[in-house]
Image: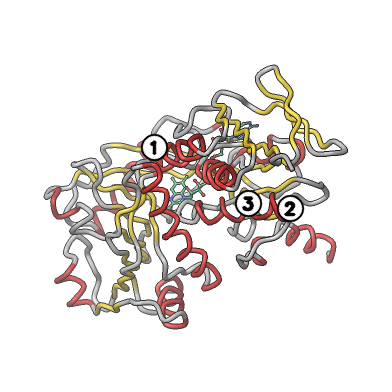
Amino acid sequence: MSSPRIAVVGTGVIGAMTAWRLALRGADVLAFDTHSPGHDRGASAGESRIFRTAYKEGPAYVPLLQRAREMWRELERSADARLLTMCGGLTIGAPDDPDVAAVRRCAEQQHLDHEVLGTAEARRRYPQHHLDEGEVMLLDPAAGVLRPEPAVQAALRAAESAGARVLPHHPVAEAVETSSGWRISSGGETFEVDHAIFAPGPWARGLEPLRQLPVQPRVITASWFAARDVAAHEPDALPIAIRRHPEAGFSCFPALDGASIKIIPHHLPRPDLDRPEDLPRGESPEWARAAGRAAERLLPGVVPHPIRIATYAEGFTPDEHALLGALPGSANATVLTGFSGHGFKLAPVFGEIGTDLALTGTTGHDIAHLAPERFAEAADVR
Ligand SMILES: Cc1cc2nc3c(=O)[nH]c(=O)nc-3n(C[C@H](O)[C@H](O)[C@H](O)COP(=O)(O)OP(=O)(O)OC[C@H]3O[C@@H](n4cnc5c(N)ncnc54)[C@H](O)[C@@H]3O)c2cc1C
């Protein structure tokens, strides 16, 4: 029997990983993207990403995270790239903060290694963070920092080595279901395939077959602050962190550029976009001052004025869990989108799941909570 011909639409991290796994399993893969791999207009760029295992989003993710970690190492070996540094991860805040409590619950229920550091011990071990009296740190040793642009490149290199055809600067203008598969129009050509995998990130609503999916593009803004003592803020000294505080909150990434740490504030707005193309690129002085106040309050080792600010588009679902499964109402199509700000770390295993679904119609991974129909069912009940 000949290999199934499969189109992957979108080669951000999710499509790139899917193309890699499909090609390894012998599929004839065509992977399309409007832009070049590793570009900075979507969700898979910005120098660093958090990997963590004690997961506040729910214990159902833990087996997926553990499989993803193995696969990151496999990709590093296949593509000869350094992508994941296991520097550990902190969740910082009051012990009864919902996120701090959820991480602790997940670690305890799943029997994951972790440490709870009281205020004095936390201040002694990680003076890069300011702690108010009574705040704690939870240390997850199975956490680290990923490098997004090299990761996308590595996955596509591995996909090409396994036989995939990668087509940058090939926007898919039209995808139409046929009696035997899908007809994909791109770059002035049409491609007949047996199955289509849609991994368009925040562009989901721009593709006609995905128009009804509840994926809202939003802006996520990152900022970098110069470290006074850079060595104390590099990954061998500073874990990744999720900071919760009544006045501010952010994710925090150690210095990878030899100069500055990155924070992504959670307490500042993440505005909706009509389309990812409308992503604002200019920086707002109000936003810069607000991010600076958060750094001044909680990060004593940095100069509290951002030296770099960058915006990215990401697709959010109403419950902030991804859509992963057969495309509702269509045959021979799989959708992977709506990763809602936490898809990067899981991308290899999501690529494996997309491959399972396209080749066999099912997967051994538990992804019931990510079924795309869950929103359609809610609408029917109303
Ligand atoms: C600033 C920021 C910080 C984040 N931090 C973390 C973190 O620390 N840890 C974590 O796990 N996750 C994090 N996330 C989330 C994670 O990065 C995303 O969930 C993930 O990158 C989504 O990848 P994607 O492939 O779905 O989307 P994208 O990377 O946006 O890729 C979609 C691709 O599809 C292409 N495309 C769209 N439409 C078409 C078309 N019609 N034809 C051809 N190509 C098309 C686009 O050009 C694009 O390349 C963060 C996200 C952002 C934005």
Whether residue 158 sits left or right of residue 31 in the image: it is left
In the image, which is nearer the foreground, mark 1 or mark 2?
A: 2
Query: Residue drawn at (36%, 50%), measured in percent from left and top?
Result: 146
Residue at x 65% of width, y 48% of height? 215
> Residue flagged by tag 3: what amino acid is it?
Gly
Q: Using the rendered image of the protein, determine whether residue 271 is visible from the camera's viewpoint.
A: no
Task: Specify whether residue 167 is in view.
Answer: yes
> Amino acid type of disc 2?
Ala
Residue 320 at x, y = what percent? Answer: 58, 58
Q: Residues within 10 Å of mark 1 (few under 14, many from 20)?
A: some
Q: Position of residue 124 (x, y in %)?
A: 14, 71
Asked if the residue at label 2 sits under 8 Å from ligand 1, the reply is: no
From the viewer's perspective, is 46 left or right of 262? right
Residue at the spot 64% in from the left edge and 37% down from the top edge: 28
* Image quarter of the N terminus: top right
Q: Is residue 279 left or right of residue 70?
A: right
Location of residue 120 by image quarter:
bottom left
* Up/down of 201 relative to 350, above or below: above
Quick one: 264 or 354, which is closer to the camera? 354
Q: Residue furthest right?
A: 179
Q: Which residue is mark 3?
A: 354
Q: Residues within 10 Å of mark 3 (few under 14, many from 20)?
A: many
Q: CA distance from mark 1 to mark 2?
A: 34 Å
Residue flagged by tag 1: what amino acid is it? Ala
Query: Horizontal and vertical percent for residue 338?
Result: 61, 50
Q: Secondary structure at mark 1?
A: strand
**Mark linked to residue 131:** none
Q: Position of residue 65 (x, y in %)?
A: 47, 63
Q: Which mark is residue 326?
A: 2
The residue indicated by pointer 1 is 310
Q: State left or right for residue 81 relative to residue 311.
A: left
